[in-house]
Amino acid sequence: MTLHIHYDHQCGGCGAFYIPYEEVICPNCGLKEEERFDFIPQAVDSLLFNLHRYGSFYPPAWAVTSLADHILRILFVVFEGFRQSGESDFPAYIHQLLEGGDWGDQFYLKAHISGIAIRVKEEIDKLGEFFDIKAEEE
């Protein structure tokens, strides 16, 4: 059992898949749509649920059923990799990790997911949990 986020969105201008959270514009064409989705707190909840329940940001089983679940899966990899890496520069770690991905015609998602990861990390840091848990592991 883990926390899924069932949400799909395509830009009304160019058809790109992305999550219109906070004030984010379409990462492909720059259109600012009215629709907003409260993704960041839900992603924080999912990541922390996994960490507290399974001892890892990455759950033991995961099925991708939506765009949000797909992005969550990438966040699981990013956060668990960072937690185990001993690195201290989160943005540099994300850049390096995502640089090696095969983005195909969705290259715009690299920067979009990086921005999501940074916002999620900021929210986890506010809770004071990430480095406390990381320190316990070392």
Image (cartoon, rainbow, N blue to C red):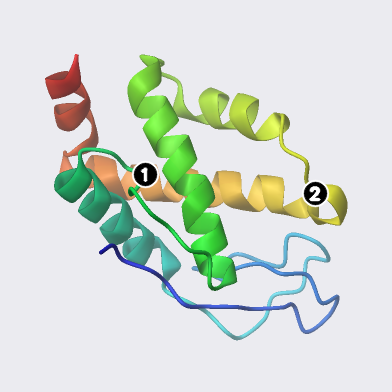
Q: Amino acid at mark 2?
A: Phe
Across and down, in percent, residue 48 comes to: 24, 50
Vertical arrangement, residue 18 with respect to residue 78, above or below: below
Q: Amino acid at mark 1?
A: Tyr
Quarter placement of the C terminus = top left
- In the picture, the disc for residue 107 is 2
Task: Tell me if residue 116 can be seen.
Answer: yes
Vertical arrangement, residue 17 with respect to residue 136, above or below: below
Quadrant of the image occupied by residue 5:
bottom left
Residue located beneath label 1 in the image: 58
Q: Residues within 10 Å of mark 1 (few under 14, many from 20)?
A: many
Quadrant of the image occupied by residue 70:
bottom right
At 37% from the left and 59% from the top, the residue drawn is 43
Task: Give whichever of discs 2 and 1 has the lower sequence position.
Answer: 1
At 86% from the left and 75% from the top, the residue drawn is 14
Quarter placement of the N terminus = bottom left
At 53% from the left and 65% from the top, the residue drawn is 64
